[in-house]
Image (cartoon, helix red, strand yellow):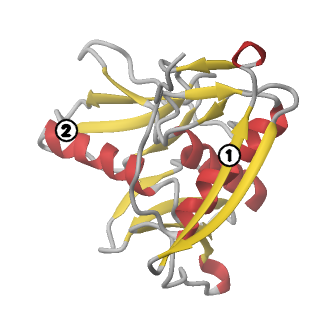
Amino acid sequence: MPEETIHEAKRSRSRQALATYFRRIAEALGRGEPVPIDDAGTVTVDPAAESDVEIELEREDGVVHFEVGVEFDEADGEIDVDAAASKATFELYADSADQWRWRLRHDNGNIVADGGEGYADKRDAKSGIESVQRNAPGAHVIDVDRGEEAPEDGGSDAAFELFRDSDERYRWRLRHDNGNIIADGGQGYASKQKAKQGLNSVKFNAPGASVEELDADEPAEDEPAEDEE
């Protein structure tokens, strides 16, 4: 049978984004779940229980090639080119003031993030969603109360900020390098660990989440919770 390329992609990634990508793979393997191949998680592979692993490091004309290959019999694994790895959906809707808003709803019904503001134009709200999808996976996480700052190297064009509000509740927000807040958790958490779980849910689920436009007469029930994954 001739060789078949099922999926192929090439683009530059920061060290942080690369770590996030490999971490998603490692976590899926550890849980025994299908492994997401692309950032959106629409292509997955479920490897065999035991596979051959080949690691190769080459240098040619000043360029280094670092390759990790996993090989197994097709009958012992499974490939899905139409998967839905994300466990959340972006909901796009108009509020009572006819401002366009978005929220990221987990499959369990909980709201894990929202844009925090209304947009006069639907296209701007969609651009906000795209910015979160693009920047959340590789964003550094910094503790504002400790005076931390995002490293200059790696990461994306945004950073997750952890902080305590006036009620001593832990919150997070995703701030773009231009200073704008492009997403927040919309709630306070009793512990920093819970806040980190919330933002990690956005890191994992935002890239592959589909966008659903709600009807004007559909109720907007925002019920955030603390235990999404």
User: Label 1 to label 2, Cα distance in Å?
Assistant: 48 Å
Mark 2: which amino acid?
A: Gln
Q: Nearest the camera: 37 or 217?
A: 37
**What percent of the width, then of the height, locates residue 6?**
47, 27
Q: Residue at x 33, y 43 (%)?
A: 129
Residue drawn where x is 46% and y is 81% of the image: 62
Above or below for 17 versus 178: above
Q: Which residue is mark 1?
A: 69
Name the foreground residue: 59 vs 69. Answer: 59
Local secondary structure at mark 1:
strand
Q: Helix or strand or loop: what does disc 2 sit on?
A: loop
Q: Would you place residue 52 above or below residue 217 in this image?
A: below
217 displayed left or right of 105: left
- Residue 207 locus on image (x, y percent): 46, 41
The amino acid sitting under disc 1 is: Gly
Of residues 77 and 24, which is closer to you in this image? 77
Q: Position of residue 114 (x, y in %)?
A: 43, 44
Identify which residue, 56 or 105, lies in the foreground.
56
* Total marks placed: 2
Circle 2 residue: 99
Give the residue at x 50% y 60%: 173
Instruction: Determine the image quadrant of residue 58.
Output: bottom right
Tell me, yes or no, if residue 161 can be seen here.
no
The quarter in which the N terminus is drawn is top right
Image quadrant where residue 57 sits = bottom right
Residue 194 at x, y percent in the picture? 74, 51
Farthest right residue in view: 50
